[in-house]
Image: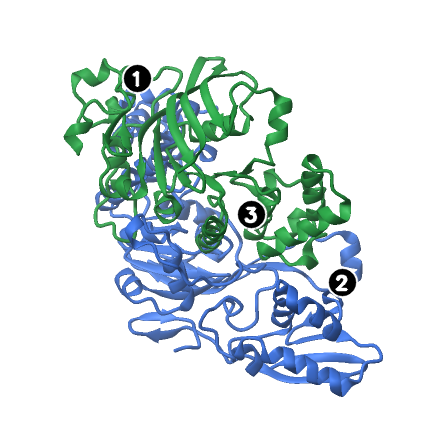
Chain colours: A green, B blue
Amino acid sequence: METLLKAEELSVHFSTKRGYVHALDGINLEIGRGETLGIVGETGSGKSTFAKAILGILPPKSRIEGRLQFHETDLTRIDTEYFRRIRGKDIALIFQDPMTRLNPLMRIEDHFVETIKAHESVSGSEARARAVAALTSMRVPESRIRNYPHEFSGGMRQRIMIALALVLKPSLLVADEPTTSLDVIVEAQILEILEDLKRISSMSLVLITHNLGIVAEVCDRVAVLYAGKLAELGSVEDIFARPIHPYTRLLLRSIISLDTKELRSIEGTPPDLVNPPSGCRFHPRCPYAQPVCAEQVPPFVEFRSGQPASCLFGKDFL
Amino acid sequence: MLEVEDLVVHYPVKTSFVQRLFSREKLSVHAVDGVSLTLRPGEILGLVGESGCGKTTVGRAILRLVEPTSGIIRFEGIDVTRAKETDMRSLRRRIQIIFQDPHASLNPAMTIGRAIGHPLKIHGLTSNDGEVRDTVLRVMREVGLTPEEQLFDKYPGDLSGGQKQRAVIARAIILKPRLIVADEPVAMLDMSIRARVLELMLDLKTKYDLTYVFITHDLATAKFLCDRIAIMYLGRIVEMGLVKRIYENPKHPYTRALLNAIPIPDPKRRAPKILPRGEVPDAVYPPAGCRFHPRCPAVLSTCGWEGRDFIDYLEERRLNPEKVRRDEEILGPLHEWWARGFQAGRKIGEQDPAQLIERVRSILIEAQPQMNQAVRDVSVRDRQVIVEFHNPDLLGPKEVEGRLVECLLY
């Protein structure tokens, strides 16, 4: 598969009053054309930071290291102006809360016209025609195109956001918790839309979520992040059936699903990223931890074909 | 232990002065519209549903944090809705609530120890600081807030989400209540620690002989935790019964839809889903008949079809580019249509009435058969074309295979 986006040793640090936050640390992964990659992690795992790095919207006081190759461009090296040209056109984003993206004082139609005109020199009527086509494909009726964002329901707003993100036919769509604020039925409707999109276009999708059920339903591959580190990467089948990293295993067991017979959880809490644990960042919570885990940073090793993990004892979990 | 009888809670909608001048109609959100349930000592009753179904309002009404519009809530023989302020005091000692957001539930300027011990002081149970401290430390140990001596003087900002929720639970149990209303207590927590908080709640239930009303949107958690559940939709209970029965064989189409929509954490079991259309409608104007009927995959012609369903159908048709022009020609622009109760209509110009009726009927034939069958008449009166629907059949909870279901299918 052709690679669309490649992260090499990608790190992001934020400067805060308490010191440096190591939000992302040495991430290596690739996203193929047409592929859906799920990025899973708990609060503070760095999953949203990853999305922000791809979109060039990291907070001002952050430092980015390593490479983030998108087509021919290294996204860590380009300036704001250049980013503005790609963002929205080649790489688009859907947020958790559509209200934060849609301008409450702008009609739906004008959001589309503005986006299209920012990137292409087309007439207003041409832009409007494309807005109508994009919205009806998301089942938003044409009669409502001149309404304001607050006049829509949550699910409808999220569909408008998706239509807006797709109107310039980006090759990469980043969806940051796109269904978290929605109810379960509407969530399933939105996921269905995303799946249909995958089928009819060669767009790649990065789906950031804490919900492993969603990952199992729509993703091709999964990246599991823990405390800014990539714990494990692999196909969705391998990750769910044959996880290697103890964190992945425990996380999967902590899911509460309709089949849950017994509650399981992971001891401890995610670490403070100003002062992350030495060695393997998961070692204080890991039931299999050995003394060496506190000393050595585990390398990211391919234990099974296409399934690397960062655990010193990865081969014991095969 | 707790009886709720025909509880109704309507919130008034704020309207502007001008709106009030022109409309005498008082708008209200029908948050809870006739809910009856009973709670037995020692059980966990789940109130399950999507946002806006009224589950939180029922929970709050039990503590009288909202004033019911009508209905009775009886807790251990006392009518909560009519209790005097002095009675409420003792009631609130016996009923406690845990909210979803532990961060918002704790005063950021109060240490954890003081916050947990606060109820003891408010209720005047003890004024001896040493005694309070001992009790607080013991409860902190019980909820797993350890090392308790260290955490006692910390502020909420120093604690993790899981620890904060434990502190909230500690504060709720320190008065040894009989009933705890837990409103989405784990929804804000990370997956890896949810289980532990739920386990804690189960442990405390045994230790303190508690009864829970567990409010959640998560059917998986409810299945694991609850003895009985009530599935709510737009202010009504649509299905209620033992967890085992309902999950094994859900009866109400809405319960089925909810169960069907839950993502399954197993990529080998991916399958296309049959989902209800659209979203939960506005609770200011709940649908006629069964409130789920506009979205129901098993809808009947008697479920409550009304004027606006016809307009929704016209709107839906216009998503299809082939139909747009034809519809526009026959029916005119969509915004000229009105809906009132069981009627929908539009002013007509110089069109031939007989021909127009014929054409509206032809469009109805292409609709869902249940909607078409529900049409009483298409007529032209006073230069208006009017589509009129039959009144729906009467709906109420029925006993079906050991649970209550509110659906005309049964």
Q: Position of residue B19 (x, y in %)?
A: 76, 56
Q: Position of residue B240 (x, y in %)?
A: 36, 65
* Rendered residue at 34%/74% (across/down): B399
Find disc 2 in the rendering and name its residue: B23
Q: Is residue B107 visible?
A: no
Task: Give the foreground label among 2 and 3.
Answer: 3
Mark 1 to mark 2 CA distance (whole Å) = 64 Å
The secondary structure type at the circle numbered 1 is loop
Q: State the quadrant of the N terminus of chain B.
A: bottom left
Q: State the quadrant of the C terminus of chain B.
A: bottom left
Circles 1, 2 touching at the beta carbon (< 8 Å): no
Specify few, some or many for label 3: CA neighbours under 10 Å numbering under 14, 14-19, or 20 or more: many
Q: Nearer the viewer, residue A229 or B122?
A: A229
| Type of the residue with mark 1 | Pro
Q: Nearer the viewer, residue B106 or A267?
A: A267
Q: Position of residue B402 (x, y in %)?
A: 29, 71
Left or right placement of residue A265 versus residue A180 in this view: left
**Numbered disc 3: what chain?**
A
Left or right placement of residue A137 versus residue A17 in this view: right
**Numbered disc 2: what chain?**
B
* Rendered residue at 45%/28% (across/down): A50
* Rendered residue at 75%/67% (across/down): B333
| Type of the residue with mark 3 | Gln
| Type of the residue with mark 2 | Ser
Find disc 1 in the rendering and name its residue: A277
Vertical side of A123 occupied by A309: above or below:
above
Find disc 3 in the rendering and name its residue: A158
**Numbered disc 1: what chain?**
A
